Amino acid sequence: MKKRYDCPPTLTDAQVLEFCKNGFLMLEGVVSDDVNRRTLDYLDASEYPVQHEPTEIMEEHWFAKGVICNDEAAGAVRSLLGCDFGLPILMSNHRVACPAPVTGGWHRDGCSKHETELHTLQVFYYPQDCPRELGPTELLPGSHFLFSPASRMAHYGSIRGGHRAASPAGSIFITAYPIWHRRSASTAAGTRNMLKYNYRRSVRPTRDWISDPEFDFARGENYVLRGATFREQFRDCHDAARMFLWLCGWGDRYEFVGGQTWPLPGHWSDHPYGYPLEDVVGSHDDQVS
């Protein structure tokens, strides 16, 4: 399997910004029933420890095309990581015999970096239906910006605002690598497979996804927080704005001014103080239609 891949981007400005705020994107049922069935057959026939890390499945043409280079999933990855992004080199399968309690607790995966740049995406794929009864992965929105020692994270129980990624077969969800996640408890009998793999940036960031000429960078409503926030007031808002500007290729424009300034949410009567893109937006060569 080749190491890099390119395809047309599929996300808009608003969708990229939403990813920056939440740290994940759900794509439900995007893998075909045939590929889901073949994936389950492959996993059922595997022997341990291949079952835990069935990396060889990526050499199967039907899997590489239907999952790794799936049109909708790869288009979203292309939007967030730019052209010629690096393909996965390791495949893990979190296979659980249900019912099972919550195990492991909240965690972020090893070697996570806490920054507002985006170089690595961690991706999850359900080859079978995964309702709440089969213990779907639970994600903590916005936690890709939230640092906590691992020894403390594991002690946290249910956190208000967590998102259980219950989804039909063929669903793929794309996350920022350091997002907090855990396997939720399952109550039904059955086997839950969840394949996990990474994509890697290979180019400098630039705003070459699907740009919207009506998208307003200056107005506070573009940066309104949704749902729970877990840190200092409005810190999530600023981190999301900083990541978004970095993805646009304008990371050096960001400055934390303080007070009621951009990107503080609000219904401004004029462009907010601290808005950094007066001479960029609307004329930048990197915009695409």
Image (spheres, grey):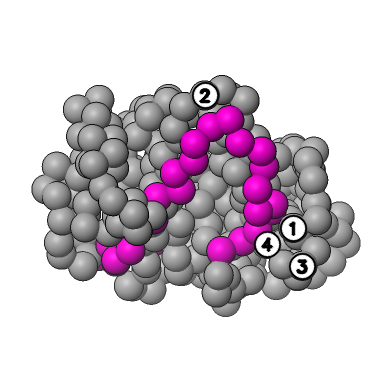
Does the rendering let one see residue 15?
A: no
- Badge nearest the viewer, 4 or 1: 1
Amino acid carrying label 4: it is Phe
Q: Which residues are magenta?
A: 80-109
Distance between the alpha carbons at the discs numbered 2 and 1: 26 Å
Numbered label attached to residue 151: 3
Residue linked to disc 4: 145
Residue type pointed to by label 2: Ala
| Magenta span contains residue 223 | no
Which residue corresponds to the image point at 34% horizontal and 54% vertical from the top-left?
A: 48
Q: Which residue is mark 1?
A: 154
Q: Is 96 in front, or is 107?
A: 96
Whether the residues at callouts 3 and 1 have beta carbons within 8 Å, the answer is yes
For discs 3 and 2, the disc positioned in front in the rendered view = 2
Discs 4, 2 touching: Cβ within 8 Å: no
Residue contact between numbered discs 2 and 1, judged by CB atoms under 8 Å: no
Q: Which residue is mark 2?
A: 189
Which quadrant of the rendered structure holds the N terminus?
bottom left
In the image, residue 70 above or below residue 37: below
Lower sequence index among marks 4 and 2 = 4
Within 10 Å of disc 4 (Cα), the crowding (few <14, some 14-19, many 20+) is: many
Instruction: Check disc 2: other Cα within 10 Å, few if <14, some if 14-19, many if 20+.
Output: few
Instruction: Find numbered disc 4 in the image and state the secondary structure of the residue it sits on.
Output: helix
Between the residue at mark 3 and the residue at mark 1, the CA separation in whole angstroms equals 6 Å
